[in-house]
Amino acid sequence: MSLPQDDTQLWMVPYADLMSMLVILFMALFAYSYSTKSAELDRALSTLQLAVGSKEDVKVRERLKEAELALEMQDQVGKMGLSDMGLHVTAKRIRLTLPAPVLFAEGSEKLGEPARPALEAVARFLSHSPQPVLVEGHTDNVPIAGGRYRSNWELSAARAYSVVDYLIARGVPASRFSIRGYAEHRPAAPNDTPEGRRTNRRIEISLLRREEAEVPAR
């Protein structure tokens, strides 16, 4: 005599498959989150984590807010019509790149008038988050000939300081800032063309995400 078959637990088979697929999905998204991604993807990932009930809702909500702020900043950058400006989102930071020719005259650390609308938008963006901010100055590899600064090291650091000074004057707390000057030693493009050198003359403003207790290496 055979025992009756119990079909009441069969639902667990597709449920287990679904859970396995979700685990694989989250692992893939988690791994990808440590490489470059768009603010749209960051927002989508955070929204999905909240939808399935993340155990770290507070952190996820913070990341969602940061992603939405980044998208707002991206929209403002687009309205300025400055194609050289860029937004770069990773798990560690949200980095805005500003071309130095937009901010400064050649060989100078003094902010020009075209810099002010861009930095006003940056100040509004930073004011919505308490995270640390890292400002990095970069130059091309053309040696400085005369003028106030002896080297590209000095010029890159002075330009980063000018940006920080402006943002502090717009209400961003000074305690949040760190400054670095890299001169020509971290190029974003080859220095053997005018276009490449223009790309390398830049200021990078990074909102460091909460996981970073210290200023991270790239």
Image: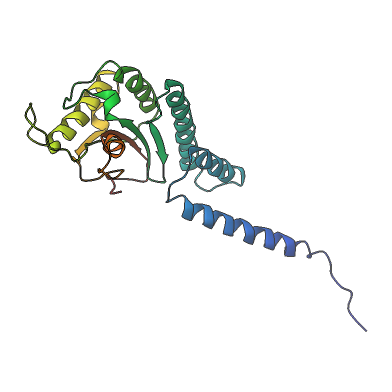
Q: Is residue 59 left or right of residue 101?
A: right
Residue at image location 18% in from the left, 34% down from the top: 156
Q: How many marks?
A: 0
Q: Nearer the viewer, residue 139 or 181?
A: 139
Residue at image location 17% in from the left, 38% down from the top: 142
- The location of residue 193, given as percent across then percent down, is 28, 40
Which quadrant of the figure contains the N terminus? Answer: bottom right
For residue 204, above or below residue 10: above
Residue at image location 43% in from the left, 28% down from the top: 73
For residue 105, above or below residue 17: above
Q: Residue furthest bottom?
A: 1
Q: Residue furthest front?
A: 193
Q: Nearer the viewer, residue 196 or 50?
A: 196
Q: In which quadrant of the rendered view does residue 17 lie?
A: bottom right
Q: Nearer the viewer, residue 7 or 162?
A: 162
Q: Residue furthest top?
A: 113
- The location of residue 131, given as percent across then percent down, is 34, 35
Q: Is residue 3 left or right of residue 89?
A: right
Residue at image location 63% in from the left, 61% down from the top: 20
- The location of residue 13, given as percent across then percent down, is 73, 65
